[in-house]
Image (cartoon, rainbow, N blue to C red):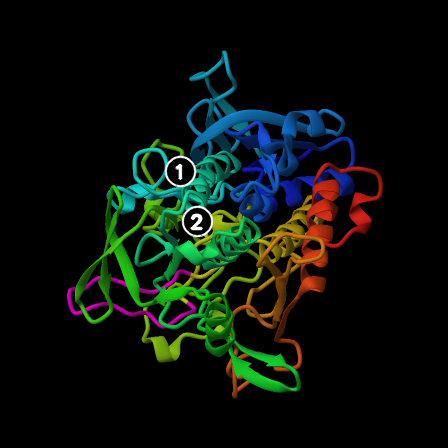
């Protein structure tokens, strides 16, 4: 009997759990450990954040779903990994701390034969003083609860605009090394849409602020998209969307402090600036969740297993080299730990070998460049590949049998720019591969026939359809495995 433990139940962790439950026989055990009792379809949080969906529309009870399967669910936070076991405990295990109400603080060791780290990121609001909804002066849509609060404050802004007042709304990234510009991108356009629907857009100044070198970088080094029979840059595409909607933009910016109603930021040229605001939704930087690792003797081997940013090292080339020498082949394929072959890391939990966008820093030494995105479709793709590999290794395969390199996979993104069945729109974009490969595609790093973007009402219908499709699939309702991931 094999025991598979999955740390985290977001898109990647829950995808791996679903498929392992489907593929493994009853003689094997699957345990999912997550500090949260509710699963959140994060891409739809932007709609919660503008009042067009409720929290219950994007969340459901994980335990209720898993109780109908052979997956054992533990509501707990992972503290440490012991891949060599310990004295008196010969099997590898993870140490967890219960977060279930009424049982908080209880510590338990869970043995495993195979471990998948799918913990996702720590939302590192603390990296920028004054950032975030809990201890700062900005809002967020990174969780459903954050999005509910964001909408509450946005509605207060709308009411003030209705009373004839003027307001400044700022959306973007809250640190020089943030990723996930896509969530902020969707949110600013949905706020613009809501203001127009409310008849108050003319009294609102809207500003996009980002650590991207150019609009449309998205942490992917920019893209060249096929549209209307010609190829254009993501910069031109993104700028046109903002010009059409009267949105200002500031790029090459690192927000370094937030005070009530005032952003402080540094530009790539080293100059310091301030931007007054009435409402700000800024995405935080991500870091690892703080997992530790120990060997059999109890010695700390965290630096051996994890990169300095807290994400787990996998089968990637982490060697330091100039940007010009970075390659698509540096990226991991199997997501297997190089030192403990029965451990894997997927989704945001794995450590990228390097940036995709060119690293930049100001004359003051401040890094101002987006981190690589690895959410959504790529997370699900690598989760499914790792689940297949573990299935095969349990059945006797000596090594991982499936690969899912981000340098060899495509991704489709449907980014909402306004939620309405008749007046809504969304940007529909495909990218192949996610990590550019200039050896295969010397002109743009990506296949121009498979990298394109459009915007329109049909995109909104697709976005809405995908929301309901993925909620249905994630609830493991009849026929879920027939649906695309």
Q: Is residue 447 visible?
A: no
Mark 2 / mark 1, whichever is N-terminal: 1
Which disc, if any, is residue 176?
none
Q: Give percent across and percent down for residue 208.
A: 39, 60
**Image quadrant containing the N terminus:** top right
Query: Is 110 colored magenta in this rendering?
Result: no
Q: CA distance from mark 2 to mark 1?
A: 9 Å
- Outermost residue to the right: 478
Residue in the picture at 45% in, 16% down: 106
Residue 65: quadrant of the picture: top right
Q: Position of residue 122 (x, y in %)?
A: 40, 42
Q: Secondary structure at mark 1?
A: loop
In percent of the image, x 69 and y 25: which residue is there?
Answer: 64
Residue 363 vs 114, above or below: the answer is below
The single residue placed furthest to the front in the displayed view is 164
> Do callouts 2 and 1 mark residues in contact (Cβ within 8 Å)?
yes
- Horizontally, residue 442 falls left or right of residue 478, namely left
Q: Which residue is mark 2?
A: 312
Secondary structure under badge 2? loop
- Residue position for label 1: 291
Q: Is residue 365 magenta?
A: yes
> How packed is label 1: few (under 14 Cα within 10 Å), some, or many (20 or more)?
many
Left/right of residue 62 with respect to residue 149 in the rendered view: right
Percent x, y of residue 266: 22, 61
Residues 35 and 23: in front is 35
Residue 268, horizontal then vertical, whole percent? 24, 69
Q: Which residues are magenta?
A: 356-371
- Mark 2 neighbour density, 10 Å: few (under 14) some (14–19) many (20 or more): many
Above-or-below relation of 259 to 400: above
Magenta-drawn stretch, dominant element (helix, strand or loop)? loop
Residue 39 visible (yes or no): yes
Residue sitting farthest toward the top: 102
């Amino acid at each position: 009997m094999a025991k598979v433990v999955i740390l985290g139940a977001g898109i990647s962790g829950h995808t791996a759990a679903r498929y392992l439950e489907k593929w493994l026989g009853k003689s094997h055990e699957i345990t999912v450990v997550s500090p949260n009792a509710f699963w959140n379809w994060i891409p739809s949080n932007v709609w919660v954040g503008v009042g067009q969906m409720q929290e219950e529309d994007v969340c459901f009870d994980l335990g209720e779903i898993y109780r109908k399967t052979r997956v054992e669910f533990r509501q707990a936070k992972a503290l440490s990994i012991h891949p060599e076991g310990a004295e008196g405990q010969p099997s590898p295990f993870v140490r967890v701390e219960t977060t279930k109400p009424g049982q908080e603080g209880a510590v338990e060791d869970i043995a495993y034969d195979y471990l998948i780290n799918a913990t996702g990121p720590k939302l590192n609001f603390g990296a920028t003083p004054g950032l975030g909804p809990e201890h700062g002066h900005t809002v967020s849509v990174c969780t459903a609860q954050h999005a509910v609060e964001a909408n509450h404050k946005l509605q207060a802004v709308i009411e003030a605009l209705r009373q004839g007042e003027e307001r400044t709304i700022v959306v973007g990234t809250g640190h020089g090394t943030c990723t996930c510009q896509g969530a902020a991108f969707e949110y600013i356009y949905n706020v613009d849409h809501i203001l127009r629907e409310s008849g108050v857009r003319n009294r609102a100044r809207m500003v996009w602020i980002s650590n991207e070198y150019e609009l449309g970088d998205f942490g992917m080094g920019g893209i060249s998209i096929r549209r209307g029979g010609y190829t254009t840059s993501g910069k031109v595409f993104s700028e046109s969307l903002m010009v059409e909607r009267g949105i200002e933009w500031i790029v090459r910016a690192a927000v370094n402090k937030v005070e009530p109603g005032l952003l402080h930021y540094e530009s790539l040229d080293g100059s310091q600036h301030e931007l007054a605001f009435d409402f700000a939704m800024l995405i935080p930087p991500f870091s690892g969740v703080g997992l530790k690792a120990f060997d059999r003797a109890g010695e700390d081997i965290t630096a051996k297993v994890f990169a300095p940013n807290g994400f787990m090292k996998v089968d990637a080339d982490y060697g330091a080299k100039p940007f010009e020498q970075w390659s698509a082949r540096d990226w991991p394929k199997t997501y297997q730990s190089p030192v403990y072959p029965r451990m894997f890391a997927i989704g945001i939990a794995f450590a990228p070998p390097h940036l995709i966008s060119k690293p930049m820093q100001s004359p003051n030494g401040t890094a101002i460049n987006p981190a690589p995105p690895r959410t959504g479709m790529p997370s699900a793709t690598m989760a499914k590949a790792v689940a297949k590999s573990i299935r095969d290794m349990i059945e006797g395969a000596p090594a991982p049998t499936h690969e899912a390199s981000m340098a060899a996979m495509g991704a489709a993104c449907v980014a909402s720019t306004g939620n309405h069945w008749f007046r809504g729109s969304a940007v529909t974009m495909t990218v192949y591969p996610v990590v550019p490969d200039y050896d295969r595609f010397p002109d743009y790093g990506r296949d121009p026939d498979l990298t394109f973007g459009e915007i329109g009402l049909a995109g909104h219908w697709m976005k809405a359809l995908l929301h309901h499709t993925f909620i249905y699939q994630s609830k493991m309702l009849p026929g879920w495995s027939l649906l695309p991931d």
